[in-house]
Amino acid sequence: QVQLVESGGGLVQAGGSLRLSCAASGSIFSINAMGWYRQAPGKQRELVATFISGGRTNYADSVKGRFTISRDNAKNTLYLQMNSLKPEDTAVYYCNALITSNVPPWTWGQGTQVTVSS
């Protein structure tokens, strides 16, 4: 069973930056597409960035140009560099497999809280 541990969140002013990390156990990390998700209070969890084996990335329109997803297979770690943060980026951020109809999520980690003040 894959275990996921997110870290790097915090309180930052609008326009600031944070770098999130997701440490994953299990050798399947390097061969699976991964994603960063976020859930704001009262809202559904949404996918914000994906990293697909081979280095392809995709982003939600709301974060495109501001967030960068990357992965270090040697360290089994997924990253999310977040720049030009906005108050609407405030949420709990999670990493997981890229969830599809054929790929169920791994057990969710505790997430990391990102709070952006205006």
Image: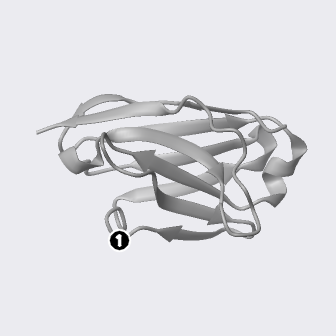
> Picture coordinates of residue 13 (x, y %)?
18, 35
Horizontally, residue 59 falls left or right of residue 110, namely left
Q: Mark yes or no: residue 34 visible.
A: yes
Quarter the C terminus occupies: top left
Q: Residue at x 25, y 32 (%)?
A: 12
Tell me which residue sits at (31%, 65%) in the image. Answer: 62
Q: Position of residue 74 (x, y in %)?
A: 80, 43
Q: Is residue 86 visible?
A: no
Q: In the displayed structure, would residue 112 be above or below residue 67?
A: above
Count of picture labels:
1
Amino acid type of the residue that numbered disc 1 sits on in the rendered structure: Asp
Residue drawn at x 25%, y 41% as measured from the top left: 16
Asked if residue 31 lies left or right of residue 112, the reply is right
> Label 1 neighbourhood size at 10 Å, few (<14), some (14-19), many (20+)?
few
Name the foreground residue: 11 vs 70: 11
* View extreme (right): residue: 27
Q: In what quadrant of the picture does the N terminus appear?
A: top right
Quadrant in the picture for residue 60: bottom left
Kindly give the residue lying farthest to the left in the view shown: 118
Disc 1, SS:
loop
Q: Position of residue 100 (x, y in %)?
A: 67, 67
- In this rendering, would 109 be left or right of 102? left
* Residue at horizontal 31 percent and vertical 39 percent from the top: 41
Question: What residue is pinned by disc 1?
Answer: 61
**Quarter of image, res 56:** bottom right
Q: How is the image coloured?
A: one colour
* Residue 52 image position (x, y, % from top left): 68, 67
